[in-house]
Image: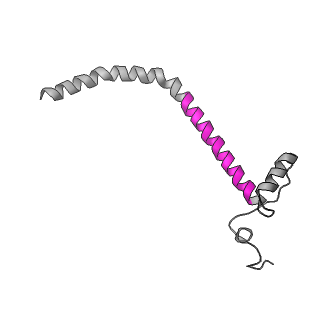
Amino acid sequence: MHTRGVYNNSIMDTTTIHKRINITLPQNTVRLLEKTVKKGGRSNFLNRAIKFYIGEVGRSNLKKLLKERALARQEDDLRLAEEWFNLENEAWSKIDRR
């Protein structure tokens, strides 16, 4: 039985299921974690850090993929632009004559 007011809201939050895991970190990382985060806040800190890291890696991979695909399409894009350039100029010249 859990009593409200004894636990902080994150523990009593029934919409989020938490799972305890056992991880191994280098001693230097543990020391840094201990200096940075108060005891009792490590799980929240690691949760936020992992989500941030995964988000950043995802954004980086997406940017890389977009750049690769843009470079692969650049010749086709240039060819299309050249094809339409003359048609567009012709259309504008007709409008200007009116």
Residue stretch rendered in magenta on the structure: 44-68
Asked if 9 appears above or below 75 in the picture, the reply is below
Residue drawn where x is 22% and y is 26% of the image: 91
Residue 75: x and y in percent read 46, 20
Quadrant of res 96 = top left
Residue 90: x and y in percent read 23, 22
Considering the image in quadrants, where does the C terminus appear?
A: top left
Residue 78: x and y in percent read 42, 21
Considering the image in quadrants, where does the N terminus appear?
A: bottom right
Asked if 59 appears above or below 46 in the picture, the reply is above
Residue 56 on the magenta span: yes
Residue 77 on the magenta span: no
Horizontal relation, residue 70 to residue 43: left or right: left
Quadrant of res 85 = top left
Residue 94: x and y in percent read 17, 25
Asked if 78 appears above or below 50 in the picture, the reply is above
Residue drawn where x is 77% and y is 80% of the image: 3
Q: Majority secondary structure of the magenta segment? A: helix
Residue drawn where x is 87% and y is 47% of the image: 27
Q: Residue furthest front?
A: 35
Report how many numbered discs are placed on residues in the image.
0
Q: Nearer the viewer, residue 32 or 89?
A: 32
